[in-house]
Amino acid sequence: MLASILDPTSGIAIALQILVILSALLLGTRYGGLGLGLISGIGLMIMVFLFGLQPGEPPVGVMLTIIAVIGCAATLQQARGLEVMMQQAEKFLRAHPERITILAPLTTWFLTVLCGTGHVVYTMFPIIEDIALKKGIRPERPMAVASTSAQMGITASPVSVATVSLASILAENAGLIDQAYSIPQILMVAMPASLSGVLLAALWSLRRGKDLDKDPVFQERMKDPEFAKSINESSHSLLDVKFEKSAVNSVWIFLAAIVFVVVLGAFDGLRPAWPNADGVMKPLSMNLAIQMVMLFAGAMILLFCKTDHKKIASTPVFKAGMTAVFSVFGVAWMADTFFSTHIDALEEQLGSVVQAAPWAYAIVLLVVSKLVNSQAAALTAIAPIGLALGIDPKVIIGFYGASYGYWILPTYPSDLACIGFDRTGTTRIGKYVINHSFLIPGAISVFTSCVVGSLLAQVLL
């Protein structure tokens, strides 16, 4: 018995190692992204020093790329560029208030696609609620789906942490899969797949719940004069805010950087090339290209857009992004340590299973995403394993939407913020927790994205 436990490749030892990983993930989620990264270090120490596993490779390339993107986006936020984008989004929504349930999720999705982070949605929640109330529309209808759509936008953004991570993973495993897939190739599948999920979820939301004038709970609350006054008199808007030209310029610089990244990914010949060890000319990797472009764009915003450099590190985008980096660092390193040791045995036992039922990969990715509350962390931990087990990279790309799994329980900050901004109480967590406002929109979005993405990946790639 003791000999089996001491042998790191024995069945008992492998089962205990899996238990260690799951325990670290479950415990880490109680302390947020930073805590998840730290507690993953406990699992790493146990596997290396107790079970004798050789440490895997931390995802340094992915982490550096994420840092470069986050640095540029945080500089944009400090230059007030994000507020400029929010203002334009509000103008669009207020021009068509009767269609808020359809347009709100499309707007939050598009903003995330442009900015690479779903955290831009916080400013939009009070605006969406205000528009819905003025038209007598149940706020839950546009708000809940707007929250899930913002996270779906991550799987369609060329500069999101998750997309950069997926492209990096495919590039790093190019020798294993015989082909590296560029960001434009990933997006021509992921973008329409993600958008399809958002549209279907928005259409479903049109009829959810009772209209406010027929909702007995809301009508009872309206009998309170103070509550009624807060509903009828308050207004949230960015339309009257005047921005300096420097803030607008920061948006143009950022958007130009995004376009340049996509173009570089689409045309290898635009990237400088050098001979490798075999004398074959190899273009600059997209990892390094993204890092350089984002650093350059951030520098331009810093130098020419009146940015307070002392406050960049205190922006919400920077804090959330660096938390994601730390989470990816700990989780991916711990997972790689386990799987790099046992990959041959796992491929022998599970290779035929996952190739016969590739949807099993999507389920695992979805569950891990919920555990770690991060699309990038889930992909960094699971996608390399899927490739090593022989899953077609087209399947990996097609199931990209499954990396968004934290709609299952209402614990993600944007969902909690959405509930807080809905003063009517229609966007809520139910009595049994699982019956919350984001469950069905999230499920529709992810399922549709995976179906459409899988079909497009087989046709387009």
Image (cartoon, helix red, strand yellow):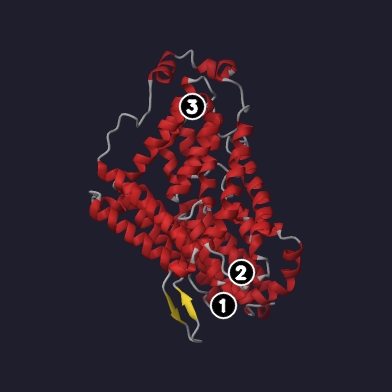
The tag earlier along the polypeptide, 2 or 1, is 2
Whether residue 108 is situated above or below residue 159 in the rendered picture:
above
Q: Residue at x 61, y 69 (%)?
A: 17
Which of discs 3 and 1 lies nearer the camera? The answer is 3
Quadrant of the drawing holding the N terminus? bottom right
Q: Is residue 433 visible?
A: no
Left or right position of 9 against 234: right
Query: With 147 as the anchor, is 243 left or right in this view?
Result: left
Can you identify the residue that label 1 sits on? 53
Binning the other alpha carbons within 10 Å of mark 2 as few (below 14), some (14 to 19) or many (20 upward) gives many
Q: Quadrant of residue 444?
A: top right
Q: Which mark is residue 77?
A: none
Quickly name the residue at label 2. 17
Q: Nearer the viewer, residue 339 or 447?
A: 447
Q: Is residue 120 above or below residue 75?
A: above
How far apart in space, not on screen, are marks 3 and 2 (Cα)?
55 Å
Residue 31 to residue 208: above or below:
below
Q: Amino acid at mark 2?
A: Gln
Number of labels in the image equals 3
Q: Secondary structure at mark 2?
A: helix
